[in-house]
Image (cartoon, rainbow, N blue to C red):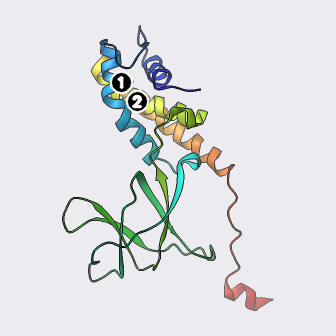
Amino acid sequence: MTSKVQICNLALLAIGAESYIQSIDEHSPQAKACKQAYDDMVEAALADHDWNFATQYDTLALVGEPPGDWAYQYAYPNGCVRAREIIRPSRQGYDPIPFTIASASDGNSRVILTDEAEAQLRYTGLITNPGMYPPIFVEALALRLSMAITMPLTRKQKLLEQQTRLYQGALIRAAAASGNERQEDRPEDADWIKDRE
C-alpha cells in the first residue's frame, strides 16, 4: 500500500536527491520541504484532472439568496476540490447545465449558482488516504510534489521546467487511462437526423 513517505521519496527521486526520508516528520531539509508542500500538492493534483477514483456525487443544499441572474444558490460541498458538472436527473441529454462558483455574500464560503432545482453535483473529492491512490495518480502526485520541492532543495530552474513537463505528460496519460475506465451514454441523434429516417 502506498504511503506519504513513498510518494515523497518518489518526488525526491525525480529531482535527483542524494538522500531520501524515513519519516515525513524528520528534521532533514528533504522531509521539511515535502511536509510543507504535500497537502497542497495532493489538492492541486486532484484538481488538475477529473480522476475517476476521486469522483463523488452530492445533492446540493440550498443556502442564502442567489444573485438576480441565477435561480438557485447552493452550499459548496465539504471536501470538494473541483466541481465538475451538475448532473441531469435522468442523465438524458448532453447539454451541460450552466453553473458557476462564487463567494457567499459573507465572504467566508463558496457557493454554487445555477438555474437547476434540486441540483446534484459531480465533483472531485479530497481523498487523503494514499492507499486509495491508483498508480497513475501516485506518479502524477509525485511529479506535482517534485515541482514544489525542486527550487527549495536544488535551486535549478531547468529541473523545475523538466518536472513541469513530466507532470503534464502524466496528466495526459491519466486522461487516456480514465477514458478506459468509464462508459459514457451514447448521445441521442439530433432531431434533424431523426427526421431524415
Outermost residue, left direction?
A: 106
For badge 1, the amino acid type reads Cys
For badge 2, the amino acid type reads Leu
Question: Is 153 located above or below residue 182 in the figure?
Answer: above
Identity of the residue drawn at 68% across and 88% down: 192
Number of disc labels = 2
Mark 1 and mark 2 lie on one chain; the one further toward the N terminus is 1
**Which quadrant of the figure has residue 68?**
bottom left
Outermost residue, top direction?
A: 18
Residue where numbered disc 2 is placed: 145
The crowd level at tag 2 (other Cα within 10 Å; few <14, some 14-19, many 20+) is many
Residue where numbered disc 1 is placed: 34
Tell me where residue 191 appears, x and y as whole percent.
68, 87
| Mark carried by residue 188 | none
Identity of the residue drawn at 29% across and 23% down: 151
**Which quadrant of the figure has residue 19?**
top left
The crowd level at tag 1 (other Cα within 10 Å; few <14, some 14-19, many 20+) is many
Q: SS at mark 1?
A: helix
Q: Nearer the viewer, mark 1 or mark 2?
A: 1
Outermost residue, right direction?
A: 197
Question: Is 102 located above or below residue 13 in the figure?
Answer: below
Instruction: Answer left or right for 13 relative to 65.
Output: right
Tag 1–tag 2 contact (CB < 8 Å): yes
**Which quadrant of the figure has residue 63?**
bottom left
Instruction: State which quarter of the image contains the N terminus.
Output: top right
Instruction: State which quarter of the image contains the C terminus.
Output: bottom right
Mark 1 to mark 2 CA distance (whole Å): 7 Å
Question: Is 117 located above or below residue 124 in the figure?
Answer: below
